Structures are given as C-alpha cells and as structure tokens.
Amino acid sequence: PNFFTLLQQRASGDLYLLPLVEGVLYEWLAVCIATLVRLLLYYADVDEKACPPMARYLIRGVRYAYSALFTLHIWLYCSLAMMVCCWVVLAAALDPTRFLAFGTAILTTVSAVAWWTSAMMRAARRFRAWVRTALDRMLHTRVRLAALAIQRAALVEDYQRDTLSDPAAAAVAKAELESLTAEEKRLRAVQGRGLWQGG
C-alpha cells in the first residue's frame, strides 16, 4: 500500500500505527511538500533584484526555512536509525537466539556497503588519475607536434634558400628535417594509440 492508502486505513480504524511511525510518515509528507515548493521556486528562476521587497524577503524566507527543515529532517532520520540500532543491540542481548541473527545480518550489510563504497571510491580516484595522466600526455603530444611543425616549416625554408648558396648548411638543414620527421612519426604513433590505450 502507498502512503495515502495507509492514511485511509488509519482514518477508518482498520490499521494501527505506532505514534513514532505515524510521526515519521507525516514528517516525510511535510518534507516532500516543502521540497516541491523549493523546486518550483528554484526552477522558476525568479530575479530577486526585480522583485518587490516583500517578495524578496518571502523567497529568502522560504529558502532559509527549507534549509532548516531539511537539516532537521536529516537529524531526525539519523537519530531514528541510531535508535533502531540500539534496540537491535538490546534485543540481541535479551534474546540472542531470536534477534542475534538479525543484528548479525544488519552489521554484515552495513560492513559490505561500507567496503564496497570504499572500493568504488578508490577505483574512482584511480580512474580519475589515469584519465588526467592520459589527457596530459595527449595535450603534450599535440603541443609538441605543433612546435615541430613550426620548426619544420622554418627548416624547409632554410633548406630551400641554402640549397644553391651553401650546400653544407643545406645538408645540416636536411639532417635536421629527417630528425624532425622521425620525431613527428613517433609522436603521431603515440597519438594514434588514443586515450584508452594511453596507459
């Protein structure tokens, strides 16, 4: 059953709810309504500077009130979770054969979730570092290729100018051009491996 079905059964007397559970349900409903109002104000994108002073104070009041309500909501649910944990521990101490299995299952679940969360965070950090390294390598390769292209253009101009007037300088320029060509081939081979093979 959904929330409204529970309310109908509660109003007709067909369902009994603990006061704590009923309070949690009403608090959840209040937070949902407040969240909808806050989202409507946020996506309406109201320009506070263009609003009258009363409307501006109202918008700020809704924002601060929602912040306080959400903080209280988180605090209540954390308190409720801690209270449930205390009751589980107390029940396991009073009747171990009946409640110790539930306590063990809860602790196992919490430990597994914590371990998996830690493992996923470590994997995310390693992946982020790997992507940053690969992108830095690709950027360095592109910058180096651009610099080699500029040097190659200058050497080609020197080689064409010195071919007839200074054969020795032309030979030096030709050797440098061959060296630049080899360097360009190596960098283009590295660039061709791409990001996913750039480990």
Image (tube, rainbow, N blue to C red):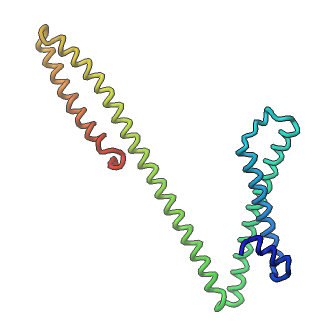
The residue closer to the viewer here, 62 or 138, is 62
Compared to 124, does 159 lie above or below? above
Q: Is residue 80 left or right of residue 188?
A: right
Q: Is 163 in front, or is 93?
A: 163
Q: How many marks?
A: 0
Residue 59 position in % (x across, y down): 81, 43
Q: Position of residue 192 (x, y in %)?
A: 29, 42
Which residue is at the front of the view, 191 or 174? 191
* Quarter of the view holding residue 136: top left
Identity of the residue drawn at 77% across and 75% down: 6
Q: Work out which residue is located at the far right of the displayed protein and give it.
A: 54
Q: Is residue 129 left or right of residue 57?
A: left
Residue 170 falls in which quadrant of the image? top left
Q: Quadrant of the N terminus?
A: bottom right
Task: Give me the residue at 54% from left, 71% from top.
Answer: 112
Residue 16, relative to residue 190: is it above or below? below
Relative image position of residue 91 (x, y in whole percent): 71, 85
**Residue 31 position within the rendered picture, expressed as x and y whole percent measured from the top left:** 77, 60
User: Quadrant location of residue 169?
Assistant: top left
Q: Residue at x 33, y 35 (%)?
A: 141
Q: Is residue 154 left or right of residue 140?
A: left
The residue depicted at 66 percent of the width and 90 percent of the height is 98
